Image (cartoon, rainbow, N blue to C red):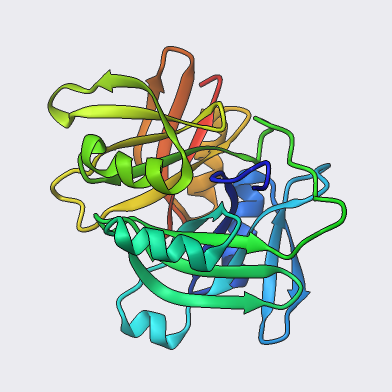
Amino acid sequence: MPEEFGQFIWYELMTTDVAAAAAFYKAVAGWSAKTVNMPSMDYTVLEVAGEPVGIGGILELQAIHLAEGIPPNWTGYILIDDVDLCLADLVMLGGSVRRQPEDIPGVGRLAVVADPFGGVFIVFTPVPMENPLPCVTPGKPGTVVWNELLGGDPDVVFPFYEKLFGWKKAEAIDMGEKGTYQLVSINGEVCCGMMRKPDECPMAFWSFYVAVDSLDAALARITDAGGAIVFGPREVFGDRWIAQATDPQGAYFNVVAEKR
């Protein structure tokens, strides 16, 4: 199995305006954007300054997506060793396939799937490489440092991910009326959280936290660039500050910093 089996390795934004979204996240997170010519489309890769690899990409929402009611959104890629075998296990565990496996020439094989409560993610197997690409610097501003599932009861949904990817439970934090916030360890690193979604939230979803240097400064950049703050600032775990936001096209994302 690859060293990073079961880990989130890529983050993809589907949006109605690729150029506007790239400009927004450049202003907010400092990401640079470059266009890569693919066989069937152009793909925008997002990069953090000084890092040897990208952290994500942007695709344009097509008419078929809009007709299905899919809004602008971020989705995470989870690295596995065999997409087709994974899908068989995923369906057996109560998950669903939202988009059948597809080969991206020179990149890898992927499928869009969902857990039993509807939380969507992408399973991905890259093409074999003699020299695997290095990882980005952990915790550096502009990198994604936390993955969060708002969905079903963590005690019910966690076994799905445990059996599929080998994830392990870490600390469970009592959130009172909101239920339990279950921390998750992937390959020895606590990098995910799961909790029951609020009743007013129409669907389960994964969301992602981008590290920033200062929370207040990042929130000012978000609003100045046309985004909106939907929650926060809030201190968590006693040493982090977070906020939740939407970009100008409506995609939901989070920011986190060590200082206000």
Looking at the picture, how far across and down is residue 211, in whole percent?
A: 59, 34
Q: Would residue 95 be visible to someone looking at this image?
A: no
Q: Do we see residue 225 in this rendering?
A: yes
For residue 237, above or below residue 169 = above
18 vs 237: above or below? below
Nearer to me, 184 or 167 = 167
Q: Residue furthest top?
A: 238
**Residue located at (80% from left, 50% from top):** 133
Direction from residue 90 to residue 137 in the image, left or right: right
Picture residue at 45% right of the left edge, 37% below the top: 167
**Residue drawn at (57%, 62%) of the image:** 82
Q: Residue at 47% across / 83% down in the picture?
A: 62
Whether residue 130 sits left or right of residue 46 in the image: it is right
The quarter of the picture where residue 232 lies is top left
For residue 39, what is the image quadrant?
bottom right
Q: Nearer the viewer, residue 29 or 63?
A: 63
Q: Provide residue 41's location: percent of width, then percent of height.
A: 66, 83
Residue 139 located left or right of residue 197: right
Q: Position of residue 149 (x, y in %)?
A: 35, 44
When the figure is inspected, residue 49 is found, relative to residue 111, above or below; the finding is: above
- Residue 223, compared with residue 74, is above or below; it is above
Q: Position of residue 112 (x, y in %)?
A: 45, 68
Question: For the image shown, how many numbered marks are present on the structure?
Answer: 0
